[in-house]
Amino acid sequence: MTYAKTLSLFQDPAHYAASNYVIRSADGHVTQAVATKNVVWHAGNWYVNSHSLGIEHEGFADAGGTWYTEEMYRSSARLVRYLAARFNVPLDRQHIYGHDNVPGLTAGGVSGMHWDPAAYWNWQHYFELLGAPLHGLGYGRSSVVMILPSARRTEPLMSCPDPTQGPSVPIPGTGTSMVQLHTAPSATAPLISDPALHPDGSAGTTRNCDWGDKAAAGQIYSVADRQGDWTAIWYDGLEGWFQDSRQAPAAVQTHAVLVTPKQGLASVPVYGGAYPNADEYPSAIPAHTVAPLQYTLKAGQEYAFGGVAPTEYYYAQTIDNSLPMDHTVVRGRRCSTRSSWGTESPSSRPPTYD
């Protein structure tokens, strides 16, 4: 969406102000739309929204990288460096991420999640500007890898629908910062099928918005298998294969704590948020529960552990705090792991209400 249209919508009482900041493409001009102390509805997930700041970048993802100007990258990086220092946010891909990394809060909402900035946002360049370059332990054959396509690698172009040319028209422009994941170690093998985006089991696509078969730069995965120049990672409960030749590597070695189901468990459910248990809410606030998503972490699979997150729910029914207990944070006794799989470990602290 254009910068002007975004600000127009944010000033319209009939719409939400959906980000804390908006950045213009042409010159990187920054406008703050909402104070950082307030929650904005930018990511389509209330739990994520209440624990993050939203920055909208002017542009259209299906136009390739044309809207992502150097002025925008540099201005955005300056803003994020400032916010990260102010709020003690680590400069890594676990904490600096796009809408396309935000999980759905419910199974029914996953397919409608935002998919920007998509394949043509240059994460490598962005993190260099942040002063925290993405790097690993060199190219090699470790059991944990970070997606980091080398300059020698040429990724297939993404596609987008065009009303006059068809549903999958190649997007012209620069190379992408992600890899496409196949069902087998072959460029002709179908792309993996995300159960939310392709509930009929049909293959994934090269569509820019089809985020369920693509892994972006800076993200860390456990290696499931290797065959020749191909590497498979555990992704959405599936093995996703990408070409990773020594001449044009797509990933670097790294290290991470890995999570897997406890012995004896066939699978672990996956959640899009970490809310307190029902008995941890005060009587004046209805318990907000969240059901598992359509993904599971199966026995024998491993995923990179991203840290521990609090189980919290921000109860906000009005803008002006006019109802009893309105604008209250309910904190539970439990914490949740921040791999994308929602396994929990107990904590001894009692629930608190702020």
Image (spheres, grey):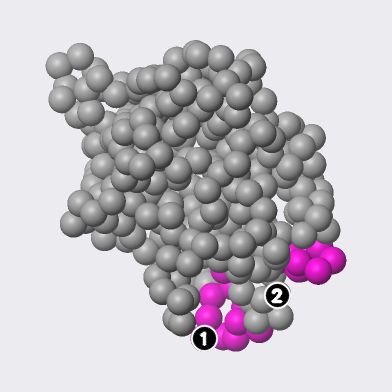
Q: Is residue 299 above or below residue 128?
A: above
Say whether residue 144 is visible: yes
Residue drawn at 65 percent across, 59 percent down: 173
Whole-angstrom CA distance, mark 1 to mark 2, is: 18 Å
Residue position for label 2: 3
Q: Does the stretch in magenta take in 20? A: yes
Residue range in magenta is 8-32
Q: Which mark is residue 32?
A: none
Residue drawn at 67 percent across, 25 percent down: 135
Classified by dominant secondary structure, the portion drawn in magenta counts as loop
For the N terminus, the quadrant is: bottom right
Say whether residue 240 is visible: no
Q: Position of residue 98 (x, y in %)?
A: 56, 51
Q: Does the stretch in magenta take in 314? A: no
Q: Is residue 328 above or below residue 240?
A: below
Residue drawn at 61 percent across, 36 percent down: 153
Q: Nearer the viewer, residue 310 or 182?
A: 182
Q: Amino acid at mark 2?
A: Tyr
Residue position for label 1: 14
